[in-house]
Image (cartoon, rainbow, N blue to C red):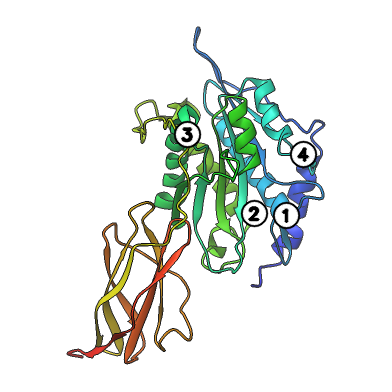
Amino acid sequence: MKLRKWMAAGLISVVLAAASVPSYIASAAPADGVEVSEGKKEIVLVIDPGHGGSNTGGQIPGLMEKDITLITALAMKEELEKYEGIRVILTRSGDEELSLYDRPKIAKDAGADLFISLHYNKAVPNRLYGAEVWIPSLGENYARAYACGDLILNELCDGYGLYRRGVKTKVGSSGKDYYGVIKYASEFGIPSMIVEHCHLDNEEDVPFFNSPEKLVMLGKLDATGVAKYFGLSSKLLGVDYSHVAKTNVAPPLTPVVQDITPPETAAVVSASLENGQIRAVLQGSDRQSGIYYYDYSLDGGLSWSPLQRWDSVETTDTVTIPGSAQTLTIRVYNQYDLAAQSLTAAVSKGSG
């Protein structure tokens, strides 16, 4: 994948400007004109720009994840400080390297109400695309992070257009949360999440992050999701989110473990050739985590298409596939990217 030269030039100037901040913890006061109502608790949010220092994160030509997480975090902080009643802290405001323990420890020391670690994704192989949020697997931390993560994805996906990969958990072999920052934040009693904005190595996501302005936009969208979660208002922006509906889930008493099994069903219900394209009804089901993608083969499984969006909330999806092959095979993928393959179906001749 080739990205534009702004990656090599534009990002460097922004990151160098950020690095001039004296402390690696940027705890700015509320913006001018912001007033906190008497007796109202000030919300404290800690934003963690993922990676830093020698820990570069994902890399593609001309771009390192550690740089763009900082740009997005700075934009998120600036946007949130336009709201009343919130104080925002960054775990780093330059190119510092912090441990997985130190990042949520900053949130603990600050008495944070929420800890959010910002990232950009990269997959092997590079077939995946879309935005996802990882949250704690247990208790009130799960319920609160789920509600906030869902609102952030509303902004990133429903509003901005990224594909929604959902709010997810991952539990390690020890029975505790797999991701270090989430595990330590939970031990500190702080709701937390990891926001994975885009897949850097997939062309489907490139249009959503391929300029500094878009990296800033992603931070603003994150901020809006957080503002809606906390019911914040902003005189400066002219918005009041005090009555925004949230997704309320019961705090689980046992860990919500990730789906480790493939979808139960994958089938081509019907396929017909119409006007040089295949019109097909596909079936896929996964009772635990749902169907998120499908791909198809027109040569009996020797080669496969890029991943396609599963656009139905039902177990069937009607799709149009370019080509005039005589057979069709599909695979369906659940929320955790596990696949099930259908039998190969004959393509009938339609009316076209």
Residue bearing mark 3:
142
Which residue occupies the foreground of this view, 252 or 69?
Answer: 252
Q: Quadrant of residue 188?
A: top right
- Check contact, mark 1 vs mark 2: CB within 8 A: yes
Question: Which comes before the other along the chain, label 1 or label 2?
Answer: 1
Q: Which numbered disc, 2 or 4, marks the residue that appears first in the sequence?
A: 4
The amino acid at mark 2 is Pro
Q: Which residue is mark 2?
A: 212
Q: Secondary structure at mark 2?
A: helix
Which of discs 2 and 3 lies nearer the camera? The answer is: 3
Decide: is 248 above or below 168: above
Q: Residue at x 31, y 77 (%)?
A: 320
- Image mark for residue 11: 1
Q: Nearer the viewer, residue 210 or 53?
A: 53
Distance from the alpha carbon under mark 2 to that under mark 3: 32 Å
Q: Position of residue 1 (x, y in %)?
A: 64, 72
**Pointer 3 with pointer 1, Cβ within 8 A:** no
Q: Residues within 10 Å of mark 2 (few under 14, many from 20)?
A: some
Residue occupying image coordinates x 67% and y 68%: 4
Query: Can you tell which of label 3 and label 4 is closer to the viewer?
Result: 3
Viewport quadrant of the C terminus: bottom left
Give the residue pinned by disc 4.
98
Tag 4: amino acid = Leu
